Amino acid sequence: MKVHLKTPESLKSFFLELGELSYFAGRFFGEVTKKPFEFQEFIRQCYYMGNRSLLLVGVTGLIIGLVFTLQSRPTLENFGAESWIPSMVSVSIIREIGPIITALICAGRIGSGIGAELGSMRVTEQIDAMEVSGTNPFKYLVVTRILATTFMLPLLVFFGDAIAIYGSYLVENFKGDVSFTLYTNQVIHILEFSDVIPSTIKSFFFGFAIGLVGCYKGYNCKKGTAGVGKAANAAVVYTSMLLFIIDFVAVFVTNIFYDL
C-alpha cells in the first residue's frame, strides 16, 4: 500500500521563492561583468544610500554606545573592573553589535526604499518601457543598486562603530572622568585585526543581501499598486531574516578559524 505524502503549500512556496531568489542572484553575477557599466547610476545610488543614511546610522550608533556603557558599568563596578569598559565595549561593538544593528537599520531604510521604488516602476510599466526601448533595465536598475549597497554598508558600519565608541567615551568621561586619550589608547590596544577583518567581510555580505532582496522583491512586484507596499514590507522582513542567518554563519566560521 502506497502512502502519498502531500507537501504543505507553505513549504512549496518557500522553496519556490528560494529558487527564484537564487536565479535572480545568478543573473546579477552574469550581468555585473558585462558592458556597458552604468558608472554614473552606481555613483548616484552610492550617494543616495550612503550620504542620506549617515544621520540615522550616526544617531543610532551614539545611542548604542551610550546605552551599552550605562548598562554595563554598574555590573563591572561591582567587580572592580570598570577599567575594562573601553575594551569590552569596543570589541563588542566592532565584532557584532555595530555591523548587525547598522545592517538592520539599512534593511529598514534602504531595502524598503529599493523594493518600493522598483515595485512602483514595475506596476507603472516603466521597466517594460525600458525593455521595449532597448535598454537593459536589470543592469541599470538592479546591478547598480546591489553594488551600491554592497560597497556602502561597510563604510556605514565603520561610521556607526566610531560614533558608538565615542558615545561610550562620553559616558566614561562623565561617570569616571576618563580622558579621550586614555580611552582611545585602551581601545586601540585591545583591538586586533582578527576583530576588524571578519566584521568588515560580513558587512559586505550584509550589504549584498540588502540590495539583492530589495531588488528582487521590487523587480518582481505584482498585483498592481497594492503589491508595492507588500514588496517593500517583504523586502524588510526577508532581509532581516537573511541578515541573522549570514551573521550566524559568519560567527560560526570565524570561531572555527579562532580555534585553529
Image (tube, grey):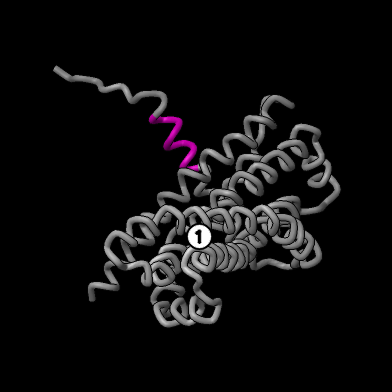
State whether residue 193 is above or below residue 126: below
Residue at the image position 54 percent from the left and 49 percent from the top = 104
Depth order, front residue of 79/163: 79
The location of residue 57, given as percent across then percent down, is: 63, 56
Depth order, front residue of 175/156: 175
Q: Quadrant of residue 219?
A: top right
State whether residue 19 is above or below residue 8: below
Residue sitting farthest toward the right: 133
Residue 115 within the segment the image draws in magenta: no
State whether residue 190 is above or below residue 88: below
Say few, some or many: other residues with alpha carbon within 10 Å of mark 1 (under 14 / 14 to 19 / 20 or more).
many
Quadrant where the N terminus is found in the figure: top left
Q: Is residue 161 visible?
A: no
Q: Is residue 108 visible?
A: yes
> Which structural element holds mark 1?
helix
Residue sitting farthest toward the top: 1
The location of residue 6, given as percent across then percent down, is: 31, 22
Looking at the rendering, the stretch of residues picked out in magenta corresponds to 11-19
Task: Answer with left or right where residue 233 lies relative to residue 101.
Answer: right
Residue at the image position 76 percent from the left and 61 percent from the top = 47
Residue at the image position 40 percent from the left and 50 percent from the top = 245
The location of residue 257, given as percent across then percent down, is: 29, 72
Residue at the image position 67 percent from the left and 28 percent from the top = 227
Depth order, front residue of 54/225: 54
Depth order, front residue of 111/34: 111
Task: Answer with left or right where residue 30 lies relative to residue 253.
Answer: right
Give the prevailing secondary structure in the magenta stretch.
helix
Q: Which residue is mark 1?
A: 99
